[in-house]
């Protein structure tokens, strides 16, 4: 879980652990002990403010950080040394430059999220690009999602599905939510329902529901539309097929009453 605190920091919790990670406006990440409240470790290596942090669901000691310096770093928090990998969008093809010159995007990186199995990492930048990385070796998989609109000046919270036959990523896109297949890059649909910019998405795997929060002060719940009618070729009857995306399916308390 990533939260925006009143101090405009990023906070994320480690699963089954008492450590809390804080990405600050300073170019550093602090690991804090929830039991004592003290800072037990500081990760330094970025050059500008930290905009997003995420723990790996596969290894609870692997942390990903994204910064306004265009860089994404992977860390092993058990070690006192520097980061494991600085992601390079060019996969080292441009030059033999030092790792410190690697950039993940051509703009600020303000969103990142591991896939549900932790094998890949998705990042979003203000260059209107989303990239999929191999989290074990840092390789850019070069999946093309097209233009992914992103004018957010702060961290952008997006989500990935879990337990679906095809894995999806849900990305705030102005007042809508764009839905892409993770490994092909295909845009499946746009979820429409909010009236102002969407700031965050969270996927609930137990109920296969998506929740979105917007500046219109609403939180919407989205559920999968499993079957929708499709006319037969002769137009005389209809049949149902599985819709691979999510459609708006919420009701307000006024409607229920």
Image (cartoon, rainbow, N blue to C red):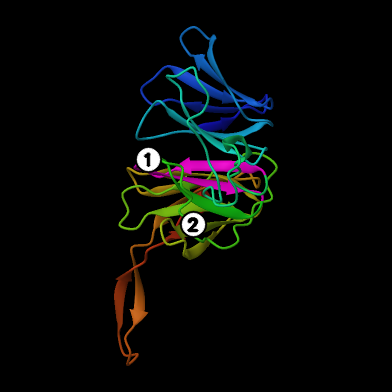
Q: Residues within 10 Å of mark 2 (few under 14, many from 20)?
A: some
Which quarter of the picture shows residue 166? bottom left
Of badges 2 and 1, nearer the viewer stands 2
Q: Position of residue 161 (x, y in %)?
A: 39, 49
| Residue 92 against residue 74 in the figure, above or below | below
Q: Which residue is mark 1?
A: 118
- Mark 2 — residue? 142
Work out whether mark 2 precedes mark 1 in sequence or the reverse, and give the earlier one: 1
Q: Residue at x 43, y 48 (%)?
A: 160
Badge 1: how crowded within 10 Å, few (<14), some, or many (20+)? some
| Depicted 12 relative to depicted 187: above or below | above
Instruction: Report helix, strand or loop for mark 2.
Output: loop
Q: Which is nearer the eye, 46 or 239?
A: 46
Report the residue that reaches farthest toward the bottom.
234
Q: How many tags in the picture?
A: 2
Tell me the CA gap for discs 2 and 1: 18 Å
Residue drawn at (49%, 6%) of the image: 36
- Left or right side of 185 for 106: right
Segment tinted magenta in the rendering? 108-126
Could you say where residue 144 lies in the image, as x and y percent from the top left? Answer: 51, 61
User: Is residue 118 shown in magenta?
Assistant: yes
The image quadrant that residue 236 belongs to is bottom left
- x and y percent of residue 247 in the render? 45, 61
Q: Quadrant of residue 52?
A: top right
Confirm whether residue 156 shows in the render.
no
The residue depicted at 61 percent of the width and 35 percent of the height is 100
Determine whether 43 is above or below 118 in the image. Answer: above
């Amino acid at each position: 879980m990533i939260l925006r605190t009143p101090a405009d920091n990023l906070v994320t919790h480690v699963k089954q652990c008492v450590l809390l990670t804080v990405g600050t406006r300073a170019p550093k990440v602090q690991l804090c002990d929830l039991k004592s409240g003290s800072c037990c470790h500081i990760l330094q290596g970025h050059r500008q403010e930290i905009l997003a942090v995420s723990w790996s669901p596969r290894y609870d000691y692997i942390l990903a950080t994204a910064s306004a310096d265009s860089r994404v770093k992977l860390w092993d928090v058990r070690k006192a040394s520097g980061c494991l990998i600085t992601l390079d969008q060019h996969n080292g093809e441009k030059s033999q430059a030092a790792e410190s010159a690697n950039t993940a995007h051509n703009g600020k990186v303000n969103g990142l999220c591991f896939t549900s199995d932790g094998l890949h990492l998705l990042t979003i930048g203000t260059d209107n690009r989303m990239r999929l990385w191999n989290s074990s070796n840092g390789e850019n998989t070069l999946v093309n999602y097209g233009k992914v609109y992103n004018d957010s000046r702060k961290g952008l919270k997006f989500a990935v599905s879990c337990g679906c036959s095809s894995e999806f990523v849900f990305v705030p896109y102005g007042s809508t939510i764009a839905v892409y297949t993770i490994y092909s890059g295909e845009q499946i649909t746009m979820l429409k329902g909010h009236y102002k910019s969407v700031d965050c998405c969270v996927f609930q795997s137990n109920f296969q529901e998506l929740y979105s929060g917007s500046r219109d002060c609403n939180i919407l719940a989205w559920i999968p539309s499993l079957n929708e009618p499709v006319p037969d070729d002769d137009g005389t009857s209809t049949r149902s097929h599985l819709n691979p995306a999510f459609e708006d399916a919420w009701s307000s308390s006024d409607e229920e009453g």
